[in-house]
Amino acid sequence: MAHKFVIISLPGAREGMLLYGNVGQHRELVEEFEQRTGQYVRVHGGGFYHQNEKDRIFTLYGHSGDYGSPQLGWMNSIPSNLKGYRFVFTTSLNLPGNELDLENVRWF
């Protein structure tokens, strides 16, 4: 089990959403969403995450063995429990990253 994320979109949609959780495989996040909603999705990559609650930083890093590198341009919707966090992306948790612009993100 590891902290993993994917970016998904519904068929025909031009916006995607962040799904994250503690799973064995990235595809488990997708399968759970599809089973819960009855909707099939398109996956725009994924990776791992680290949630620093003290400093309110949510770091996305790496890539998914199931779906490849995250296409962050598709990440337009983020779960509302993460509102107030700064989002950073880096290729490795040990390297400096870039803060993501969340100005146009919708919280769900």
Image: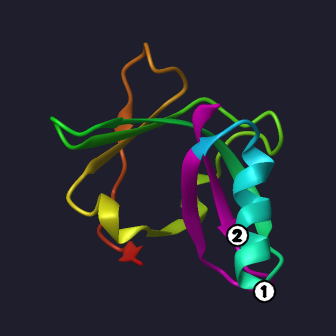
Looking at the image, residue 15 lies above or below residue 21: below
- At mark 1, the secondary structure is loop
| Left or right of 30 on screen, residue 88 | left
Q: Nearer the viewer, residue 14 or 60?
A: 60
Neighbour tally class for label 2: few under 14, some 14-19, many 20 plus, Cα within 10 Å: some
Q: Name the colour scheme.
A: rainbow
Q: Residue 33: which numbered mark, if any?
A: 2
Give coordinates of residue 85: x percent, y percent: 25, 52
Where, quadrant-wise, is the C terminus in this rendering?
A: bottom left
| Left or right of 14 on screen, residue 76 | left
Q: In the image, is residue 16 part of the stretch drawn in magenta?
A: yes
Give coordinates of residue 67: x percent, y percent: 80, 45
Main secondary structure type of the part rendered in magenta: strand
Q: Nearer the viewer, residue 107 or 69?
A: 107
Q: Identify the residue at horizontal 64%, vertical 46% (top origin).
A: 70
Looking at the image, residue 89 lies above or below residue 81: above
Q: In the image, is residue 26 part of the stretch drawn in magenta?
A: no
